[in-house]
Amino acid sequence: MTQIPDITLNNGVTIPQLGFGTFQVAEDDTQRIVESAIETGYRHIDTAAGYYNEAGVGAAVRASGLAREDVFVTTKLRNGNQGYEEALAAFEASRAALDIDYVDLYLIHWPVPSKGLYIETWRAFEKLLADGAVRAIGVSNFLPEHLEKLLAETDVVPAVNQIEVHPTFQQSELVRVSREAGIAVEAYSPLGRGADLESDEVTTIAQAHGVTPAQVVLRWHLQQDTIVIPKSNNPERIAANLDVFGFELSTDEIAQIDALEAGNRTGADPATADFTQMR
Ligand SMILES: NC(=O)c1ccc[n+]([C@@H]2O[C@H](COP(=O)([O-])OP(=O)(O)OC[C@H]3O[C@@H](n4cnc5c(N)ncnc54)[C@H](OP(=O)(O)O)[C@@H]3O)[C@@H](O)[C@H]2O)c1
């Protein structure tokens, strides 16, 4: 079985560098698809209250027969549940849906600056960490100004910032600022939701290594110490996305992919996104 490298977070907890994303995996399909991902070798699953599939993720983890500590589970607080008491209650709802004793990584899904609640939400996260309900706490979609405020006004430095990163949308400055603060970078939509797999450069590099464009893009992330969580519903692609540890990109190939930056954001802009539900 594939050996997935671990990344050590700033509180000493380790996270498998490559995990399995579940955004837009339908509720009814989730247990089957996540079970097959775990069977393929994934040991890190990324879900969210807003994906409405936590129950399927938890059921798959239990059905896998693996010890609980052998699967790393991330979930996220829905935007509409920000606030101290609301976040604590929402965490309990997520823990009940997952039906697992503890969550490995709990993230604030979006900063929602227009609501101004992420500082008090983070204090609830600090309590969950102190209580042992979660092993690590982090943020998602936080821009430099949100990180700066959080670091200035609270005690625990986030373990992770989960942000959109892929060859045509690299957010280099945000990656730099996060890492400088000791926050690991986790790339969501690592394949650009499929859109970054068509480029001539990526295709040529893939042919040279006898691999697929998606494998090249995942390798590009991994070689920069980024945590990645590709999503697929397709068994062949689920397996291929994990089979990325048998080849290495050269410095020149990495530079060619770096040059694909095009400001191509595929998701919402965290500076303005204020939706209260994530569906
Ligand atoms: N924190 C946040 O705000 C946030 C936002 C977005 C996503 N996320 C997380 O990040 C995970 C991944 O992001 P994502 O789902 O947006 O995008 P992604 O992983 O970049 O791309 C998924 C898309 O690419 C296709 N695909 C997957 N593997 C492929 C391969 N080997 N070759 C060709 N196509 C392939 C999938 O189709 P098939 O399923 O048909 O294979 C799907 O359409 C999510 O599932 C979620 O867990 C977090």
Image (cartoon, helix red, strand yellow):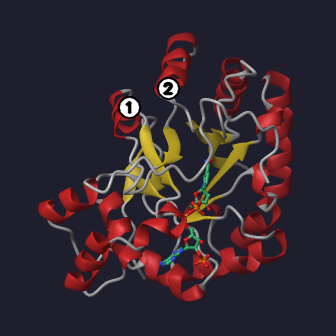
Q: In which quadrant is the C terminus drawn? A: bottom right
The residue under the point 51% across, 49% down is 265
Task: Give the image quarter of residue 217.
Answer: bottom left
Crowd band around label 2 with a 10 angstrom C-alpha radius: few (<14), some (14–19), many (20+): some
x and y percent of residue 214 in the render? Answer: 41, 74
Q: Check if mark 2's residue and mark 1's residue have beta carbons within 8 Å.
A: yes
Front one among 123 and 194: 194
Front one among 125 and 121: 121
Residue 182's disc is 1
Residue 24 visible to the viewer = yes
Q: In which quadrant is the N terminus drawn? A: bottom left
Inter-mark Cα distance, 2 to 1? 8 Å
Residue 144's disc is none
Residue 44 visible to the viewer = no
Q: Does residue 74 appear to the left or right of 83 in the view shown? A: left
Q: Does residue 199 appear to the left or right of 25 in the view shown? A: left
x and y percent of residue 218 in the render? Answer: 38, 66
Label 1 sits on a secondary structure element that is loop
Residue 157's disc is 2
Amino acid at pointer 1: Gly
Q: Residue furthest top?
A: 153
Ligand 1 appears in which quadrant? bottom right
Q: Does residue 255 appear to the left or right of 23 in the view shown? A: left
The residue under the point 22% across, 82% down is 209
Crowd band around label 1 with a 10 angstrom C-alpha radius: few (<14), some (14–19), many (20+): some
